[in-house]
Every structure is written in structure tokens, then in C-alpha cells.
Amino acid sequence: MQPQTVIFIGPQGSGKGTQVQNLMAHLKFLDSERSVSHIQTGQAFRALREEGGYTAARVLDLIDHGELVPDFLTNAMVVEQLRREMTDNSHVIFDGFPRNLSQANLIDDILVFYMRNQLSVVYLDTPDEVVRERMRKRGRIDDTDEVIDERLRLYNELTEPLIEYYQKHSSVRFVTIDGAQTVDQVKTAMIAGLEL
Ligand code: AMP
């Protein structure tokens, strides 16, 4: 099997986190020897709560208001993790990154540098009403109504244009999945779409 490079795109509450876990488990099942790098920017930022300090405080202020962390910091964290973990054979899953065009451009550079010529994009197409309902049930610390609205607004404005960006790339395998389906249905469609 070729090393897989997969980007997940979907709004908050589209089931991205769950399906990333499903994909990681499936890749481990197919080949337990191979490492899987999981690039999860949101989790990396939330972990700063324990670390403390001025940078952490600034980041947490943005997160708690549903704003995006600036690209320079987000990109630096992604690059640093890749620098530590990347091998010529590991699978890489991007989860919550890219969220805007400039971050997508960074991934383009990353793929060239690491000589990854096959990119897959899993798009969890999920209506606003479904994600709002799921977010209310999740009840994470940064999941108040206003913050949910702001994140959704930024998703529609900045992240959704990436769908067209990747659909236009002829070398990208673009997999669209109805995110309103059950977890198992989405998983089956994802594995089939990625031909794994
Ligand atoms: P998530 O866990 O992916 O929902 O991310 C939680 C929060 O972390 C987001 O609401 C943003 O404030 C911040 N964040 C996560 N990923 C990014 C990113 N790629 N660019 C900017 N901010 C991000």
C-alpha cells in the first residue's frame, strides 16, 4: 500500500474526529507496522491550556471566541510535528487543517517537499441544522451558542472554498460523503471512497 496522505474537511460536528479515528484504526488493521501521523491542530491548541504562558493565553482567548488562530502559529505547529514525525512511508492525516486557502497552500508545499504525489480529501458534507444539533449535545468548554455560530460562519466563509480548490486539482482523490448518515455508514463510504 502507498503511504496515504488524507485531508478531512467538514464543519464542526460533521463527525470528522470520529471518522479520523475510524480511518486510523483501519490503517493500523491493514498494516500495524506503519506509523500514522495525526495532525490535529485544534487538539494541539487546546493542550496549551495545561502549558500556560502568554502564547497559550492569547491562543485560548481566540479559541474560546470561536476565532481562528493566526496562520503563522498554526503553520509553525503543523510544520514542527511533521518535521519530527515524517518518514517516507508513514501515513499522514490532516484533521482540522487546512482551514483556509493560505493553509492549503502550505500543504501544497509540504506535499512537494515530502514527495507525496497522491493526496486524498474526505469531505463530510453536513447541513448546518445537523451540526448545530450535534454541537449542542457535545457540550465542550468552547461550545456555547455564540461560539458555535462564529465557528460555523468562519467555516462557510474560509474553509468551504477549499472544496472547490481541491475538486479542481486533477491529482487529488476527492471523496464526498453525506455527513448526516450514521457513523457506520460514513465509515463504510469513507473506506470505499479511499479504496482501502
Ligand atoms: P477544532 O478542534 O478543530 O474544532 O479546533 C478548535 C479551535 O482551534 C478552532 O475553533 C480554532 O480556534 C482553533 N483551530 C484549530 N485548527 C485551526 C486551524 N487550522 N487554523 C486556525 N485555527 C485553528
Image (tube, helix red, strand yellow):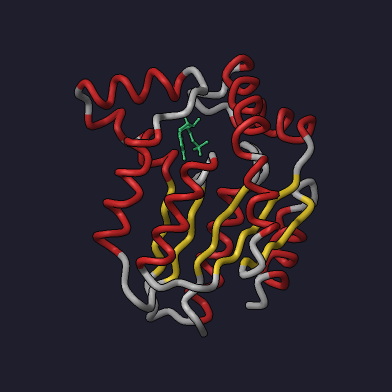
Asked whether, in this view, residue 127 is left or right of residue 175, the answer is right
Q: Is residue 139 above or below residue 189?
A: above
**Where does the C terminus fall, quadrant-wise?**
bottom right
Q: Residue at x 71, y 28 (%)?
A: 132
Choose between 61 and 52: the one closer to the eye: 61
Location of residue 12 in the rendering, given as x and y in whole percent from the top left corner? 62, 36
Asked whether, in this view, residue 162 is left or right of residue 47, the answer is right
Choose between 51 and 193: the one closer to the eye: 193
Q: Residue at x 59, y 26 (%)?
A: 151
Classify residue 147 by image quadrant: top right
Q: Is residue 165 above or below residue 27?
A: above
Q: Residue at x 54, y 63 (%)?
A: 6
Location of residue 35 in the rendering, given as x and y in whole percent from the top left corner? 37, 72
Asked whether, in this view, residue 114 is left or right of residue 152, the answer is left
Choose between 120 and 165: the one closer to the eye: 165
Q: Going by the picture, which residue comes out furthest to the top?
A: 146
Location of residue 161 in the rendering, given as x and y in whole percent from the top left corner? 66, 41
